[in-house]
Image: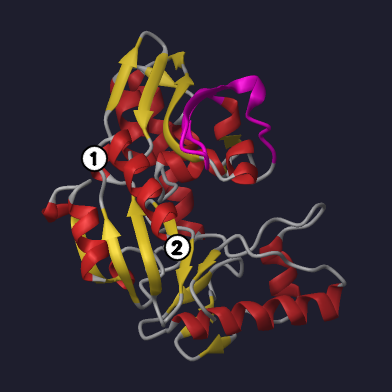
Amino acid sequence: MESIYHKLTEILPVDRIRTEEPMCNHTTFRVGGTAAFFVMPGTFEEVSGTVRLCKELHIPYYIVGNGSNLLVSDQGYRGVLIHIGKELSHIRIEGDVLCAQAGALLSVIANRAMEGGLSGFEFASGIPGTLGGACIMNAGAYGGEMGDVLTKMTVLTPEGELCEIPREQMELGYRSSIAARKGYIVLEASMRLKPGDRQQIRLRMEELREKRVSRQPLEYPSAGSTFKRPEGYFAGKLIEDAGLRGLSVGGAQVSEKHCGFVVNKGNATAKDVAELMRLVAEIVEEKSGVRLEPEVKRLGEF
């Protein structure tokens, strides 16, 4: 462990390397054990250098953004978590193109677009994630998705190469992309937006925020929609029709406000969440014949 730490200090400043970092502080579920190493690169070179080191030393590594779609085991993660966050969150606007680094929060990008009089990103203003994760999973909400605006992504390939992917090569689908399928790390992305009236853009963002507040259990920690939308169905409706509203395992509960959400009522463990998700999927399949697939990613041993 000490030798790994020393090698990391050759790549990153000491103040951006943490050991045994509690992951409950870095996921929106607010559960999970500790990461052996938690690093916060501030340049593309620091990201690639950390990944290269992990591969050389055969140490497992994982990229994390805002932790809004992640369930970390109670036993934690015995590897290197590479946090792409505020240290890599620069945003710039050139005409109708907004370019942002992968650590920029979607809410911040939406506000910058609004301030710049650019429309088309309002749909993402309430998604609690970073741009990198949103590109990888082609995140969407309220009739919009990243694929509507993306024009280019800068990625780090598993082979350690930096390359640009134009829109026509992104292979964007429902919660999927070429980046997800090939294990690319998104470092930056460009989006083409449309000139619009700042006040109208602001009003649309406020309208969507009010919808979220009224329909979603934002008062509790969660990872947003827990399951992917099955073709021809809505996950929340299937869960509700199966009579699972309010079903609990330990401190985890199927939200009474929106059945598509599993929430942490205050003292949940990752094991509670995982078991509740398993139970919900099993019962829904038994009652409807539809198998729900998790949208939440698991990390560590369960």
Residue 263, relative to residue 124: is it above or below? below
Q: Give the position of the N terminus as an image quadrant.
A: bottom left
Residue 220 in the figure: left or right of residue 170: left
- Kindly state the secondary structure of the residue where label 1 is placed: loop
Q: How far across and down, in percent of the image, does residue 13 sit?
A: 14, 48
The first of marks 2 and 1 along the sequence is 1
Q: Residue at x 29, y 21 (%)?
A: 92
- Kindly state the secondary structure of the residue where label 2 is placed: loop
Q: How far across and down, in percent of the image, does residue 251 sit?
A: 44, 87
Which residue position holds label 1? Answer: 42
Q: Is residue 301 magenta?
A: no
Residue 292 in the figure: left or right of residue 133: right
- Range of the magenta residues? 149-173
Q: Is residue 163 magenta?
A: yes
Residue 196, relative to residue 177: is it above or below? above
What kind of residue is marked 2?
Answer: Pro
